Image (tube, helix red, strand yellow):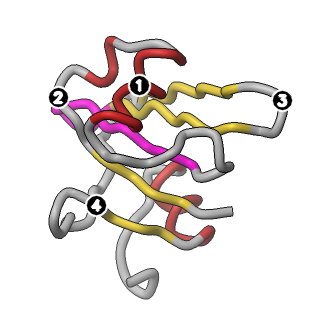
Amino acid sequence: MGLNQWRLNGSLRKGHDGLAALVQSALKEDPFTGTVFVFRAKRADRLKILFWDGTGLVMAYKRLEETTFAWPAIQNGVLTLNRAQFEALFEGVWGYPLW
């Protein structure tokens, strides 16, 4: 499973179809391949995750109450994560030795 994350303005206001359209139009990617797309709020306290599970689009939302997601540097608007990095990001934990 590929893991990619992007932060696009206004993306957290969108639902399944809106995020899938954004992945296609802005990122030139196919949202129906099983790749996990992660979108972050500007304040870095919320994430939306979109992926195709083979039968439909799945969207998850997570909000941290007392902290923010530690977001690694993004080059050229794209960051590709392995599974351990994604899990650390989703848990709100980030840093060495994951990079």
Residue topped by disc 4: 78
Q: Tell me if 63 is positioned left or right of 70 in this view.
A: right
Q: Residue at x 41, y 16 (%)?
A: 18
Which segment is the magenta one?
36-45
Task: Name above or below for residue 94 compared with residue 33.
Answer: below
Q: Position of residue 85 (x, y in %)?
A: 50, 69
Q: What is the spatial separation of the Cα atoms under label 3 and label 4, in whole angstroms?
A: 26 Å
Q: Label 1: which residue?
A: 21
Sequence-earlier tag: 2 or 4: 2
Q: Residue at x 50, y 29 (%)?
A: 62
Q: Nearer the viewer, mark 3 or mark 2?
A: 3
Residue 7 falls in image quadrant: top left
Gap between marks 2 and 4 measured at Cα:
14 Å
Residue 55 marker: 3
Residue at numbered disc 2:
9
Which tag, 1 or 3, sits closer to the chain's start? 1
